[in-house]
Amino acid sequence: MMLLKHSHVIVLASCLVCTGIGSCLRAAASQNSNLENKLRGAAQKGELVEVKRLVNAGADINAADINGETALYKAADGNLALVQYLVEQGAVVDSATYDTQCSPLTRAVAYGYLRVVKYLVDRGANVNFIGRFNGESPLHVAARQGDLEKIEYLLGKGAILMPAYPSEGEGQQDKTELNLDSSALSVALENNNDKIARLLRNNGAKTARKRW
């Protein structure tokens, strides 16, 4: 009877509680977003101690910025210990950026150390991860960088010698022919890197037989 008699008080209290919860949730989301921005910033700077502090404070390790870049992607061009920590904490190894569809491995190949590349591959990173717009794989990036050591490693791990698909609008039937024009070998030849071109040819790469 007391519950019915004072139901308006209960309803009012419930509304106040709900309003309070909503405000708390919004504040928590804002705080988490701030934590994650700081996490990505610390990862990019290679600040392992700060990254650990932010993860322990509740930052989402796989939260991406507006470009789709996660803390692991930001860290992939530098500190191995930081990359190891992020992966051990559950960072997705093959996360992709929104615009170019680059992976942490692609970034490590382009700007980082071989030991980081090896670690990511050992933890399941796809050596044939293809960029959505340029059709380039980590092998292409290594050829463009002229990094013989990384090319040898990627080939040893099963890297393909051509992109996975041709340029948008090209026919399925012409894939092999067209892809030869945009292969890692063509990148090496464009850069006049005879040593890398020779390595790729020794592993089965071929130049295009016709031009478009």
Image (cartoon, rainbow, N blue to C red):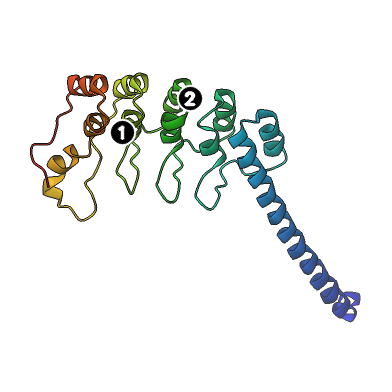
Q: Nearer the viewer, residue 175 or 5?
A: 175
Q: Is residue 130 left or right of residue 176?
A: right
Q: Where's residue 96, x and y in %?
A: 44, 44
For disc 1, the neighbor class at 10 Å (few under 14, some 14 to 19, many from 20) is many
Q: Residue furthest left?
A: 209
Which picture quadrant has residue 197? top left
Residue beneath the point at 66% across and 34% down: 51
Residues marked 1 and 2 touching at CB (< 8 Å):
no
Q: Where's residue 126, x and y in %?
A: 37, 33
Residue at which label 1 appears: 140
Residue beneath the point at 63% across and 41% down: 41
Q: Specify the amino acid type for callout 2.
A: Val
Which picture quadrant has residue 136? top left
Residue beneath the point at 58% across and 23% down: 81
Residue beneath the point at 54% across and 36% down: 72
Q: Where's residue 45, x and y in %?
A: 62, 34
Task: Check the image and report above or below for 20 versus 111.
Answer: below
Task: Work out whether residue 91 can be spotted.
Answer: no
Q: Nearer the viewer, residue 54 or 179?
A: 179
Q: Where's residue 18, x and y in %?
A: 77, 67
Determine the secondary structure under disc 2.
helix
Q: Is residue 174 left or right of residue 131?
A: left
Q: Is residue 10 left or right of residue 90?
A: right
Determine the secondary structure under disc 1.
helix
Q: How many numbered badges does the structure rendering display?
A: 2
Task: Check the image and report above or below for 82 versus 62.
Answer: above
Q: First in sequence, mark 1 or 2: give its number.
A: 2
Q: CA distance from mark 1 to mark 2?
A: 18 Å
Q: Can you tell which of label 1 and label 2 is closer to the viewer? A: 1
Residue at which label 2 appears: 116
Q: Specify the amino acid type for callout 1.
A: His
